[in-house]
Structure formats: C-alpha cells, structure tokens
Image (cartoon, helix red, strand yellow):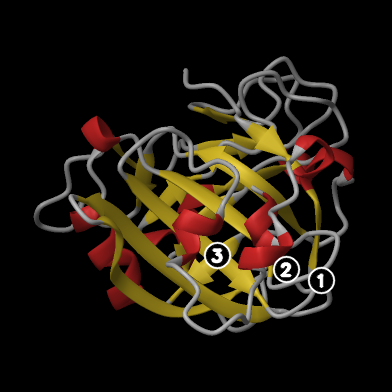
Amino acid sequence: MRRLLVTGSVLLTLLVSVAAGDPGEPPLPERLADTGGGSQLITAEAPSEGSTTGTVTWWERRRGGWAEAGSAPARFGAKGLTEGGTRAQGTDTTPTGLYDLPYAFGIEPAPAGTRYPYRRVNDRSWWCQDNSADAYNRWVEPRPADCRAAEAEHLVTYGTQYAHALVIGFNYEWPVRGRGAGIFLHVNGRGATAGCVSVPAAAMSRILAWADPDRRPHIAIGTRSGRTAITRY
C-alpha cells in the first residue's frame, strides 16, 4: 500500500509572494508545498470551507514545469470541507490534504486506455465503514460478520456514482477509527456528496484514461484561501 502523505494539521504554509490571486502567478502545482513526488497531480479546489462545489483539475509535469491536462466542475461534501487530520466520520465533510490514489474501481468496465489497477464491483463487494470491524475503511468481498451492513456501503447499489471511481488514500494506510472511511473521487450523483469528491461521468472517464500509476499521481484537496487553502499542501 502507498503511504498517506500529509493532512491539514502538518501542512506547510506557502510564501505570501505567491498567494492565490496574484497576477501572473505560476500554475497551481508550482505553488504547492508538496505534490507527492510524482509527475501527475489532481487538484480539487473549492472557494471556501463551506462550499459544496468547485473545480477538479488534472496536471502533468513536463519539461517546462506543470501544465494543465484537463479540468471539470466538482462537487464536495454536503457540509463543505474540513481539515483531514481532525475530520470526524459521519459529518458529510470532504477531508482536505494531499493523498495518494491506491487503485481504481467501478461497476462498469474500465474506460479505454485505463492503466491504473482497476477492480470491478460485483454483488458481493462492500466498503466497510464499521469502526468495530477489522476491515475498517477497506473493500471487503464478501462482507465479514463483524462489519455490519448498516455501517458499510454495498458498492453495487451506487450505479451512477460508482460507475467509475478512484480510491482517495484518506485514513487508508493506518486507519484511525472514527475519522472516516470510503472517500473516493467518483461520478456525480444528484447533488453534494457525503464527503467524497465527484465530477461528471465524462470527466471521470478522462481522468482514468489519463492517470498513469508509473507517474505516481496524487490528489490535493483544499480551498482557495484560509485555514484549508490548497496552496499549503
């Protein structure tokens, strides 16, 4: 498994001279304190902590620096965004921070060109969110006895949202009970999410066809300014 890089409680502050909004500012990845060390990056940026919408942009490092490869409107948690390091489960907030992307999954076949490890959802696929279960914040198949159905997502029942998705490595490698489970980048549903980041279906397909595990993509989630400003990551 890949490591969780950083959460809001340990992120660095960007120099004022390159604060968001300055004329002629460099591309967003060049203003981050950390991009994960790879040559691909996804940014998910909201106007403020209370926002439920914003923008997802995917970037790649080229000879001259970081360049935008695509962007799409995004949706966040119904209660906005919050520091990943202090987030509480069940708050409908999207955790801010810089995270790896362990693998992709979906109910539908992987989009053409997908290179990421891709796991197909079936009737036995669940994501365990039960704090008392050994498999907390893990895909389980079938659902174990200690993971209550009421505290787990039966993935196949989310036919729209989980048609295609990427696991976000929030609280993943060493899960902290009560912090949250099942945070993904997935296809839009009817409105705001329960804490995930979502984009239109066409954008999700484009992201999966673009993402190259050999280039170690990560996702940086945050706001334009303030305590959870994305430029701190």
- If you read the primary sequence from the N terminus, does the residue marked by circle 1 or circle 3 appear first? 3
Q: Secondary structure at mark 2?
A: loop
Inspect the image, locate mark 3, and give the three-letter code of the amino acid beneath it: Ala
Q: Residue at x 33, y 59 (%)?
A: 59
Farthest residue to the front: give it.
17
Residue 37 position, x and y percent, is 42, 32
Q: Nearer the viewer, mark 2 or mark 3?
A: 3
| Residue 31, picture quadrant | bottom right
Q: Secondary structure at mark 3?
A: strand
Instruction: Give the crowd class for mark 2: few <14, some 14-19, many >=20 residues within 10 Å.
Output: many
Would you say 137 lies left or right of 199 here? Answer: right
User: What is the CA distance from the residue labelled 2 to the residue labelled 3?
Assistant: 12 Å
| Residue 202, picture quadrant | bottom left
Would residue 210 be visible to someone looking at this image? yes
- Residue bearing mark 1: 49
User: Mark on residue 77?
Assistant: 2
Would you say 25 lies left or right of 127 here? Answer: left
Residue 193 position, x and y percent, is 66, 69
Instruction: Give the crowd class for mark 3: few <14, some 14-19, many >=20 residues within 10 Å.
Output: many
Q: Secondary structure at mark 1?
A: loop
Inspect the image, locate mark 1, and give the three-letter code of the amino acid beneath it: Glu
Q: Is residue 209 above or below residue 46?
A: above
Q: Is residue 76 above or below residue 30?
A: below
- If you read the primary sequence from the N terminus, does the residue marked by circle 2 or circle 3 appear first? 3
Residue 232 position, x and y percent, is 69, 52
Q: Residue at x 70, y 55 (%)?
A: 15
User: Mark on residue 130?
Assistant: none
Q: Nearer the viewer, mark 2 or mark 1?
A: 1
The front one of 189 and 66 is: 66
Q: Residue at x 35, y 36 (%)?
A: 38
- Residue bearing mark 3: 44
